Image (tube, rainbow, N blue to C red):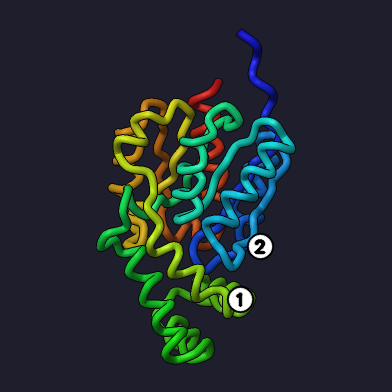
């Protein structure tokens, strides 16, 4: 059997309402640790299609890639990996938001509510409301990224909230290393989601962080996932 091509790049996607700037901070150290290039994807107006297309381009360019992401980015990365195993070296999934259909998940409800608020109240009022109820690091991060992504942000939030991610049955068929990082105290991304992903997938690890830790140092998300991937592959 021919050896697999070397991993050419880590292609990573942000969570809903976030952007490539955050991905650089979340996965830059991880890519450097693994000795590969980081390709941080920027959300487009057509959120899901745009990500899938960019992943296809990266796989064609580099022959074999690692894929990863935060929240909805983790779901999209895993969905792509399920369909492209020959060109995928594994998944770095930080804070997976739900399994299969979003249903009544907190993350999907939050995205839908934010999209509705942006339509109803506009950007400035919605940012003021978000800022008043968020930790300072999160308020600063979303203040920056929302201003950058708006007005496409509204459709991106809607697309994320309706995305059907990997099901338990699909995860059971994932013949790739799946390195998951969860937060023990993050209500938007329940820890049980990541744990259940790991139970379903045949080759998976779970590393746990606190919301405070990764909130103040985004690189911990990527580095934690990278350590998990190395545990599964070395």
Residue at 44%, 61% (x, y): give it.
212
Which of marks 1 and 2 precedes in the sequence? 2
- Residue 69 at x, y percent in the picture: 53, 50
Most extreme residue toward the top is 1
Q: Which residue is mark 1?
A: 144
Residue at 66%, 55% (x, y): give it.
24
The Cα–Cα distance between marks 2 and 1, rounded to whole angstroms, is 10 Å
Q: Which residue is mark 2?
A: 21
Most extreme residue toward the left is 104
Callout 2–callout 1 Cβ contact below 8 Å: yes
Residue at 41%, 84% (x, y): give it.
117
Nearer the observer, 103 or 194: 103
Looking at the image, can residue 219 be seen? no
- Residue 68 at x, y percent in the picture: 55, 45
* SS class, disc 2: helix
Mark 1: few/some/many CA within 10 Å (<14, 14-19, 20+): some
Query: Does 9 sit left or right of 137 as displayed?
Result: right
Placement of 41 over or under 119, stated as above or below: above
* SS class, disc 1: helix
Where, quadrant-wise, is the N terminus in this rendering?
Answer: top right
Placement of 41 over or under 153, stated as above or below: above
Nearer the observer, 225 or 44: 44
- Residue 119 at x, y percent in the picture: 45, 86
Q: Which numbered disc covers residue 83?
A: none
Residue 189: name its quadrant. bottom left
Residue 186: name its quadrant. bottom left
Residue 149: name its quadrant. bottom right
């Amino acid at each position: 059997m021919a050896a697999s091509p070397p991993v050419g790049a880590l292609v990573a996607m942000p969570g809903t309402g976030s952007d490539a700037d955050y991905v650089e901070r979340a996965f830059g150290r991880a890519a450097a640790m693994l000795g590969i290039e980081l390709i941080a994807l920027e959300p487009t107006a057509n959120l899901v299609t745009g990500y899938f297309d960019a992943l296809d381009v990266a796989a064609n360019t580099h022959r074999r890639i690692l894929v990863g992401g935060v929240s909805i980015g983790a779901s999209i990365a895993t969905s792509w990996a399920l369909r492209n195993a020959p060109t995928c070296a594994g998944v770095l999934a930080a804070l997976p938001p739900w399994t299969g259909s979003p249903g009544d998940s907190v993350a999907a409800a939050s995205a839908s509510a934010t999209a509705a608020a942006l339509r109803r109240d506009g950007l400035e009022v919605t940012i003021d409301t978000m800022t008043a109820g968020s930790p300072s690091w999160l308020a600063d991060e979303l203040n920056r990224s929302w201003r950058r992504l708006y007005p496409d942000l509204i459709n991106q939030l809607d697309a994320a909230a309706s995305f059907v991610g990997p099901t338990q049955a699909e995860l059971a068929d994932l013949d790739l290393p799946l390195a998951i990082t969860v937060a023990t105290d993050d209500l938007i991304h329940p820890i049980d989601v990541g744990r259940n992903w790991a139970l379903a997938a045949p080759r998976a690890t779970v590393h746990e962080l606190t919301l405070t830790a990764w909130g103040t140092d985004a690189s911990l998300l990527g580095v934690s996932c990278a350590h998990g991937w190395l545990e599964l592959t070395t």
